Amino acid sequence: SAQRFRLRFSTSPPSMALRFEVLGRFNRARAARLTLPHFTCQTPLFMPVGTQGTIKGLTTDQLETIGCQIILGNTYHLELRPGSQLIDDLGGLHKFMNWKRALLTDSGGFQMVSLLHLADITEEG
């Protein structure tokens, strides 16, 4: 019979390192706890895409209310708009988004390669 898992959302101190713990298994499925610097997530989870630092049509309060634990961002698009300097000036991506829970950003490598024809590559970067 399937084991049941209760989800608990909790914040964790920003200095905490990444940790992944499997809490239970059923056949090929598993439930786990993913501890990140800003939040502890329970898996499996839904991760909405906030490509440019926002989830269109929902506030961060609404995202918390529906149980969103983590938002995915794309560093390539964040660099294009709004830009890393603006994000840094405003205190980082969490403050820019007004999001206290976890964030995951991908490298933007696919976009970097697929949109290479739009790039100006110099010795400086």
Image: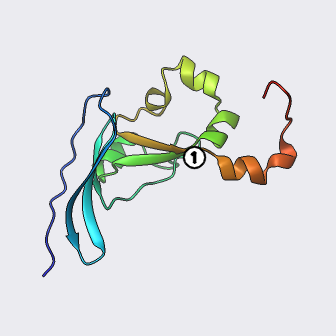
Regarding residue 81, the answer to whether it shows in the image is: no
Quarter of the image with the N terminus is bottom left
Image mark count = 1
Residue 84 locus on image (x, y percent): 62, 27
Bin the neighbour count of mark 1 within 10 Å (Cα to Cα): few under 14, some 14-19, many 20 and up: some
User: Eyeballing the image, is 53 above or below 114?
Assistant: above
Q: How is the image coloured?
A: rainbow
Residue 71 locus on image (x, y percent): 44, 47
Q: Which residue is pictured at 27% across the width and 67% down the height?
A: 30
Q: Which residue is pictured at 66% across the width and 48% down the height?
A: 109
Amino acid type at mark 1: Thr
Residue 35 locus on image (x, y percent): 29, 43
Residue underneath mark 1: 51
Nearer to us in this view, 98 or 101: 101
Q: Which residue is pictured at 18% across the width and 50% down the height?
A: 8
Nearer to us in this view, 62 or 79: 79
Callout 1: SS = loop
Q: Is residue 63 left or right of residue 83?
A: left
User: Eyeballing the image, is 103 above or below 16?
Assistant: below
Quarter of the image with the C terminus is top right
User: Eyeballing the image, is 88 above or below 81?
Assistant: above
Regarding residue 111, the answer to whether it shows in the image is: yes
Q: Which residue is pictured at 75% across the width and 50% down the height?
A: 113
Residue 16 locus on image (x, y percent): 29, 31
Nearer to us in this view, 57 or 38: 38
User: What residue occupies the far top of the structure in this picture?
Assistant: 89
